[in-house]
Image (cartoon, grey):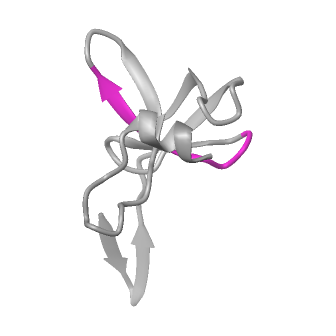
């Protein structure tokens, strides 16, 4: 939301900070909300995507493959 007052622009941010376990650094840490479903670990800086399926879990954001599809978590773990 941008508000204008006397030729000044003010930007309002609504951030969410949650406790969670980062799968990248494997630590219990704080996760800062970047978007509605994306979070960043404050310990290692990894970008995570929130998945809700009976429980809330955070998975690393992975780059797309050369053919345009996304890696699955199992493929990502095997590549490293």
In the image, residue 37 sits, relative to residue 29, either above or below, namely below
In this orientation, which residue lies closer to the viewer: 52 or 76?
A: 76
In the image, residue 74 sits, relative to residue 60, either above or below, namely above
The overriding secondary structure of the stretch rendered in magenta is strand
Specify the farthest residue to the bottom.
Answer: 7
Q: How many marks?
A: 0
Q: Quadrant of residue 2?
A: bottom left
What residue sits 71% from the left and 24% below the top?
27
In this orientation, which residue lies closer to the viewer: 40 or 59?
A: 59
Q: Quadrant of residue 21?
A: top right
Residue 53 locus on image (x, y percent): 26, 17
Residue 12 locus on image (x, y percent): 41, 60
What residue sits 36% from the left and 60% below the top?
64
In this rendering, does residue 48 appear at all? no
Q: Quadrant of the N terminus?
A: bottom left
Specify the farthest residue to the top.
Answer: 54
In this rendering, does residue 2 appear at all? yes
What residue sits 49% from the left and 43% below the top?
76
The answer to whether 2 appears left or right of 40 in the picture is left
In this orientation, which residue lies closer to the viewer: 74 or 37?
A: 74
In the rendered image, residue 49 lying in the magenta stretch gets the answer yes
Residue 19 locus on image (x, y percent): 57, 22
In the rendered image, residue 37 lying in the magenta stretch gets the answer no
The answer to whether 34 appears left or right of 71 in the picture is right
Residue 46 locus on image (x, y percent): 60, 47
Question: What stretch of residues is rendered in magenta?
Answer: 43-52
What residue sits 37% from the left and 48% below the top?
71
């Amino acid at each position: 939301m941008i508000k204008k007052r006397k030729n000044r622009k003010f930007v309002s941010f609504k951030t969410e900070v949650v406790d969670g376990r980062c799968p990248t650094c494997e630590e219990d840490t704080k996760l800062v909300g970047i978007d509605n479903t994306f979070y960043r670990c404050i310990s290692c800086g990894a970008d995570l995507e929130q998945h809700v399926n009976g429980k809330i879990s955070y998975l690393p954001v992975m780059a797309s493959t050369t053919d345009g599809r996304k890696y699955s978590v199992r493929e990502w773990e095997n590549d490293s």
